[in-house]
Amino acid sequence: MRRIFSLSSGALFGLGLLISGMVDTSRVQGWLDTFGDWDPTLAFVLGGAILPMAIAWRISEKRQAPLSGGTFPARPTQKITPDLALGSMIFGAGWGLAGLCPGPSFAALSFGGWEGLLFVGSMIVGMLLAVPAKRTRLGMA
Amino acid sequence: MVEQSYIYGLVGGLIIGVGGAIYLLGNGRIMGASGVIGGLVDGSGRSDWRDRALFIAGLIAAPWLALTIIGAEAETNITSNPSVLIAAGILVGFGARLANGCTSGHGVCGISRLSLRGIAATAFYLLAGGVSVLLFKHVLGVI
């Protein structure tokens, strides 16, 4: 069951990203471009995605365990750490620069050409660079 | 038509949310793209690599399959500037892992749980994204 859940969840995520137009970098940049020709589509995507997720969180509170066993994710600390703030700002800067984030960059891999591949390759390098950064100074908080 | 994109956005968003709901209620995991991918990249998610690999397989295959079946092409409007792609990719990968989440984990899954961290992260990356587009598009003109 776990495997079916994983595969179908990823498939729906990819389909949703395609249908919503979030694989189109100009839509994402259009949303962030408040000084240009502003495109509010992303707000509809985020709002639409939050709705079923909010219901799912409610259901998870009433259930003992996930359908395939194990436990539900514990509520994380509500601390706003320097890592969270700094990391999110660095992420946001790159997101605005190319109009891509991790989900859509993978959803677009089959049709994004060498450009999409180069972005994903660079993103993986960035992910690896974050490992020592978290362990040293930045990881203190 | 501009309004049509809102409807596609809403429908696509609902489908994304159902995907996240299945991942949570089925597997007890938070559907965060940078977390699922990052755990495979740095080996921290070795114990459930199969779940992660299958999720990623679905994520890549479903759009490809859908486009093949309907015989359409998706617009990405992705830049062909290698420097921009490399810089943006590194920033996105590094930042998302440092912050422990991106638009899906902090945005979709965090906000829907009314997580203060998710809401704060979203505010930070929206702000930085807006400044980034302002700077690179309107001031420097590189994108």
Image: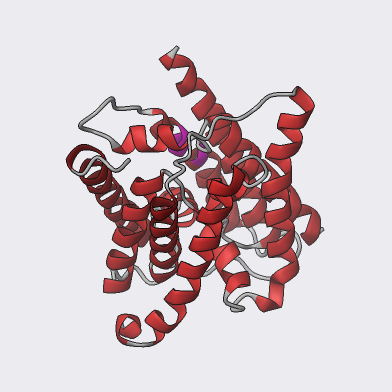
Residue B100, given in percent of the width and then of the height, sits at 44, 67
A114 over B76 or under it: above or below: below
Q: Is residue B87 visible?
A: yes
Q: Residue furthest left?
A: B139
Q: Is residue A48 magenta?
A: yes
The kind of secondary structure the magenta stretch mainly shows is helix
Q: Residue furthest top?
A: B1
Q: Nearer the viewer, residue B48 or A68?
A: B48
A103 on left or right of B22: left
Q: Residue A3 falls in which quadrant of the image?
A: bottom right
Q: Quarter of the image for the C terminus of chain B: give it.
A: top left
Q: Nearer the viewer, residue A107 or A69?
A: A107
Q: Residue at x 72, y 49 (%)?
A: B58
Q: So how many labels did they put on this image?
A: 0
Q: Is residue B16 magenta?
A: no
Q: Is residue B32 visible?
A: no
Residue A121, given in percent of the width and then of the height, sits at 55, 61
Q: Quarter of the image for the N terminus of chain B: give it.
A: top left
Q: Residue furthest bottom?
A: A136
A95 on left or right of B22: left
B92 over A139 or under it: above or below: above
Q: Residue at x 46, y 63 (%)?
A: B93
What's the magenta region?
A: A45-49
Q: Residue at x 34, y 46 (%)?
A: A96
Q: Residue at x 32, y 72 (%)?
A: A83
Residue B25, given in percent of the width and then of the height, sits at 65, 55
Q: Nearer the viewer, residue B101 or A96?
A: A96
